[in-house]
Image: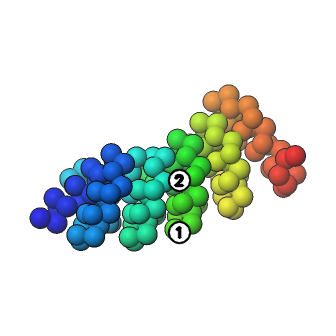
Amino acid sequence: MAYRSVDELCNASASGKLAEVKTLLQNGADVNGFNTSNRTALQVVKLGNDAVAEALLEAGANPNLHDPACGLTVTHDAAREGFIDTLRVLVKHGADVNLVDKQGNLPLHLAAKEGHLEVVKLLVGLTTDPKKSNTHNNTAGQLAHDYKRTDTAAFIDQYLSSGEWPK
């Protein structure tokens, strides 16, 4: 029965069904339990649905659990997709922005690669090290350059050269 409630919680979370998520949590669904796909409700939350993420986090969801397959955290997912408000919710509830995935990527690497400048600024402001390389020896700035994310690359370059926020 417990496994079923975790699957139900994950399905409701992925569908953005806040009322159903709250009901399942109130009825004892394990907020950090893994579903049959080996994912937690927070890991499958419909990104950009801050209300569902907030409900799960308030119920004790761990924002720092790694996906067993690739090592991504929810913070990596939100950074990659550019969901800055979701990132703020995650950080408010203890998400560590300095955790790496199995390829050594920080959430910053993924945000820079996708050109999410405001997310990059947020992560750098939260002490994420833009000089850190992943397992392929790429920094966030190098990824921004490689993927032609001009504004993001310029921000990181200027930040690294001056140690201050670009004007």
The coloring applied to the image is rainbow
Q: Position of residue 144 (x, y in %)?
A: 67, 36
Residue drawn 33% across the image and 51% down it = 17
Secondary structure of residue under mark 1: loop
Is 36 displayed left or right of 116 in the figure?
A: left
Q: What crowding class fits label 1: few (fewer than 14 Cα within 10 Å), some (14-19), or many (20 or more)?
A: few
**Amino acid type of the residue tagged 2 in the rendering:** Thr
Q: In the depicted view, which residue is nearer to us: 43 or 24? A: 24
Residue, far left: 1
Residue drawn 75% across the image and 35% down it = 151
Q: Position of residue 98 (x, y in %)?
A: 58, 60
Q: In the depicted view, which residue is nearer to us: 59 or 97? A: 59
Residue, far front: 19
State the mark number for residue 94. Answer: 1
Is 114 displayed left or right of 26 in the figure?
A: right
Quadrant for residue 57, please give it: bottom left
State the mark number for residue 86. Answer: 2
Between discs 2 and 1, the one toward the N terminus? 2
Q: Position of residue 66 (x, y in %)?
A: 41, 58
The relative height of residue 8 versus residue 114 in the rendered view (above or below) is below
